Amino acid sequence: MQTYYDPADLKKFGQIGEFQKEFADKFFAYYGAVFAEGALTAREKSLIALAVSHTVQCPYCIDAYTSDTLEKGCSEQEMMEAVHVAAAIRGGATLVHGVQMMNKAKELSM
Amino acid sequence: MSTTKSLKAAGHTLASSAAQLDFIGNDTFSKLGLPSFREKLDDVDLFPLTPTQIDIFQVNVGKMCNQVCRHCHVDAGPDRKEIMTRETMQQCLDALAKTSIPTVDLTGGAPEMNPNFRWFVEELTRLGRHVIVRCNLTIIVANPKYHDLPEFFRDHQIEVVSSLPFYNADKTDRQRGKGVFADSIRAMKMLNDVGYGQEESGLILNLVYNPNGAFLPGDQGSLKRQFKRVLSDEFGLVFNDLYAITNVPVSRYLDYLITSGNYDGYMEKLVNSFNPSAAAGVMCRNTISIGWDGQLYDCDFNQMLDLNVASQITHIRDFDADKLAKRSIIVNEHCYACTAGAGSSCGGATA
């Protein structure tokens, strides 16, 4: 193993069943159902997946959902706005804890 | 980067069909361990691929075009002078008159730039055939002599099929040239104004979507909904259907794939997305393609690769539907584009 991440490994995702078939089959069936057209369109789900991919910082997911959003006819602007949603929630999650810091600081201070 | 010259005018190696075939047939497939298209067809009992019957008579009336799109499989452009003569058009009419082929599909280049285009359309409608024109939209506003094309199309009840690869200027212009989106919107408005795409007008305006890069088209129905919503909300435009077409690795799109480093990945994606039902429904089975010089081909892509029909009948002047029906269709690795995913044809998805 030369590197931890290899783009070619993405194509091997389906092979995880080799070590545990039952769970893999259940996962992929579930995965397929989640991303099908539903109350949300497949296009909306793909943009959510792209945003979450950046939150979990998974290079495989970013690769897969960049292609998928492009295939679904999303514009680059929509894709970047999705990433900003992820970033805003991440940043907001940090900053909102600032209140906790303030509470504690006030508790400890004169 | 936008270009203004065809590969041919630029003296590019890939202007030669032999060079393209050589590249497509090179060792990429064995290197990636991919099966040939022929093997893949064989696996699903479709080799040799045979015609069903001719429903579509597709005539490429010339390679001249007012645009130089980056993905063009024809390598069309203003510098291309190959144009169908009136004599060859007459041979097409004579061939059609002997048959009951219902649909004539006119393509190019920009077919409207052929000086005999209007005469040809009039003669075709006189034969009672349904005529489709593959109009790039911008030709309508390119020159005052084309401004009345919407009325001409309407008067002859022509079905208009127009390329619009995206619903914004950025992506459209990157593929088709600077200013193309704005001109396309103006032209679409002119078509809408004479009734095209309007409910109950009977005047059909269909759009063609093709991916703006090295990826496959998504679901045709969802793309259509998205295009309808944006074009209506932002521009007040309407159209009937949207055809999602997969880019075929021929000519300028092949050049794009190679120079962008996407060739291997794209071919692998096409092969892995092979769909047997799309293979059974490929358009070459019910289409005959006629080149600007009257030569016959299985499809417009084979035409650009100079892969003539495998038949004793190779020119429109000798057209014989029965003899052509006995041929086998010429296939090569570029054919994977028509069998990937939901399939692809000049009328969009096939599976």
Image (tube, rainbow, N blue to C red):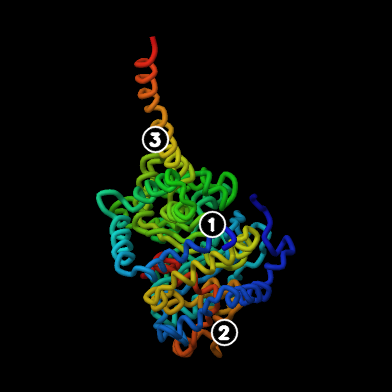
Disc 1, disc 2: CB below 8 Å? Answer: no
**Res B329 label:** none
Label 3 in the same subunit as label 2: no
B276, B187: nearer the viewer: B276
- B220 horizontally vs B270: left or right: left
Q: Residue at x 34, y 50 (%)?
A: A45
**Res A4 label:** 1
- Which of the 4 image quadrants contains residue B54? bottom left
Q: Residues within 10 Å of mark 3 (few under 14, many from 20)?
A: some
Q: Is residue B190 in view? A: no
Q: Residues within 10 Å of mark 2 (few under 14, many from 20)?
A: some
Which of the two discs, 3 and 1, sits closer to the camera?
1
Q: Point out the image quarter for the C terminus of chain B.
A: bottom left
Q: Residue at x 37, y 46 (%)?
A: A48
Q: Residue at x 32, y 57 (%)?
A: B202
Cα distance between the residues tagged 3 and 1: 28 Å
Label 3 in the same subunit as label 1: yes
Identify residue type, mark 1: Tyr
Residue under label 2, please give it. B314
Image coordinates for residue A24, horizontal then vertical, percent? 33, 65
Q: How many marks?
A: 3
Image coordinates for residue B211, horizontal then vertical, percent? 49, 57
Q: Is residue B252 above or below residue B231?
A: below
Determine whether the residue tagged by mark 2 lies in a helix, strand or loop: loop
Which of the two discs, 1 and 2, sits closer to the camera?
1
Disc 3, disc 2: CB below 8 Å? Answer: no
Image coordinates for residue B348, horizontal then vertical, percent? 41, 64
